[in-house]
Amino acid sequence: MSLLSYIRHNKEIFIVPFFILLIHFTAILSYHYAYAQQKYPYETIIDISSSTTISKDLFQSINIDQLISIAHTKNLCNTTQWWALLHYKKNIFGIKSLVDDPKFFLAPDGKYNPQSELDATIRYLYSYHEKENPIDRFMARYEWLKKELQTPSPYEVFCKKYQEIVSFKDTIKVNLVFPTGYINSPASMFGHTLLTVQSQYNPGLLSSAINYAANTNETFGPLFAFRGIFGFYKGYFSIMPYYMKVQEYSDLESRDIWEYTLNLNQEEVRFMLFHIWELDNVYSDYYFFDENCSFNLLYLMEVTRPDSHLTNNFFFWVIPIDTIRKVINAGFVESTSFRPSRTTTINHMVLQLNPDQIKFVKSIANHENKALTNLLNSSFTETQKIQILDCASEFIQYRYANKEYTQKEYQDLFINVLKIRSSFPQTLSYTIPDPPRPETGHYSSHIRLQGGIFDKKPYSELVYRPSYHDLCDDPSGFIPGSQIIFGETAIRYDYDNQKLLLQRLELINIESLSPINPLIKPLSWKVITGFDHVPFASNNQTLVYQLNTGSGYTIEVFKWLQIHGMIEFSGLLNNGFKNNIEAGPGVSAGFVLQPFQHFRIRGYIVDTYYLYGEACNFLTMKAIMQYNVSQRYSMRFEVTSWYNEQWYNQFSAALTFYFW
């Protein structure tokens, strides 16, 4: 559904010959009015002239030069409202709008010149045009200028869409929605934000979702990443039913959803809708790190309260959770609610089942012969049978979303389960406790001051991490078992050699340690690539480019202890190696332990046997202990040992400051 069709509540749907239109003109108008009053709660009757043109005489009393003079006197071109409407930002070269579509501007230099764009807008809105209604194109600009100039345009009463929006009397609520990160998708691992607009006529899942995204059909991951990082995609706003987004995030991607209800009054909501209208089919170049989905969405809220400056003070990247904090700190949020994903719901249900119940859930989902009949004839209590059926219905939907059934298999199985379930009148509650809210987690960037000893030699180190989270950070508000690090850089000063050197540059460090359960068995995996100093017997602390990947499984022994094992592959590049490369397979095992609320311990061992290059065995063992003091601070201790013909040991202590 396009944006235009969304805001346009009444549609002219009859195309008839002209002579039939003349005969039935009165009847059609009467029907149209009755239908609109029944379906939409307008306060007033909108009297739109049947003429498609507007009289030039209506503009004779308007002195455009005088209106422009008033705008200059009031310095409207430099107000926060005008800059928010045009998405203007200052940079080292001057002023520039972040909207890139030429049709968004009226002046030839409007993208760079707020004054000339304002003058052109006033002339456009208050001059006579024979074949177009300018308010259809720029409703928000007009609504603001009408108040500032104290002059309505004759076009206003002829703009049907404008009149419909201002006359709609039902209360409209706007929610800022945050689907948590989806670590299996590079474009979604940081999470996402969108808006929903709802009223009593389209509540809850029936509301409309306003989304900004890159327009692409690219399926090749590296090319998608390259083009997304460097702005080769055009980003557009779109509108679709919210239930479709919930199905995509919750069912297909297992992403929990947080909904933040905004405290916008109805005048602010109306102005937001005007601005959304202006942005329909208008593109801005999409950049994965900064001008992304979350950043552009901020403009829709900023235009309602321009002094909030929601789009200011971001640097080289914009992470969705940081925009959530910005909106909350600016006072936009009145309440918060949690919508668990289907995977979260199933995991919660499984905890309430005994092993025999789980066996029945599996047999039902596997469509085993007489599984439902055997359940009815079993010795389970009525409550236990209901638990089995409820969990089975969720699990069946989960498997169908993952394409494990054909549509017919799914329909037959699901309907049979629902039929049996309907024979039990009892309703059970599966209330899932709300996890910590995403905005309560630590901030996205950090600087770490670190000192230690390597092979009996002291050093100091400054570590800068642009984003985002590792397994020893406080997990509150983040994807459980996830580690997502981009661009972590460590500069080390070696006191023994009195040298400053690049110790490490982790371009990508991603780990997903998702515990398995009796029903769902996600794969744990990792990808690490970048530059690092690795100790080899032949050359102490060799700078190499590494690529390390692995996959396996994670088991949650207790709520506070997870263990994992992986089969790995490692490759190292350095011109000092035989054939410039070392590559080979390996295995790893480790654990993540949280004995107390703010204290986390991680340990792992990696054994790699390099087969290509100069054959050798390389062993790495590491233990990290971290105390997370607050959103801003943590203390970390690390012990690392390497073995390659001889042992190398390193100990360090660090203080971390989180910021964004």
Image (cartoon, rainbow, N blue to C red):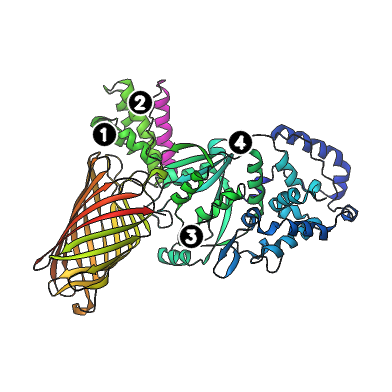
Q: Nearer the viewer, mark 1 or mark 3?
A: 3
Q: Which residue is mark 4?
A: 199
Q: Amino acid at mark 3?
A: Asp
- Residue 608 point in image, percent of width and height: 17, 63
Q: CA distance from mark 2 to mark 4?
A: 35 Å
Q: CA distance from mark 1 to mark 2?
A: 14 Å
Q: Quadrant of the C terminus?
A: bottom left
Q: Amino acid at mark 4?
A: Ser
Up/down of 569 relative to 412, above or below: below
Q: Residues within 10 Å of mark 2 (few under 14, many from 20)?
A: many
Q: Are marks 1 and 3 in contact (CB under 8 Å)?
A: no
- Element class at badge 3: loop
Q: Which residue is mark 3?
A: 290
Numbered-mark total = 4
Give the residues in magenta. Answer: 405-428
* Residue 408 on the magenta span: yes
- Element class at badge 4: loop
Q: Nearer the viewer, residue 420 or 64?
A: 64
Q: CA distance from mark 3 to mark 2?
A: 48 Å
Q: Which residue is mark 1?
A: 359
Q: Which residue is mark 2?
A: 386
Q: Amino acid at mark 1?
A: Lys
Q: Is residue 126 left or right of residue 334?
A: right
Up/down of 292 relative to 159, above or below: below
Residue 581 occupies which quadrant of the picture? bottom left
Q: Is residue 127 left or right of residue 332?
A: right
- Element class at badge 2: helix
Sequence-earlier tag: 1 or 2: 1
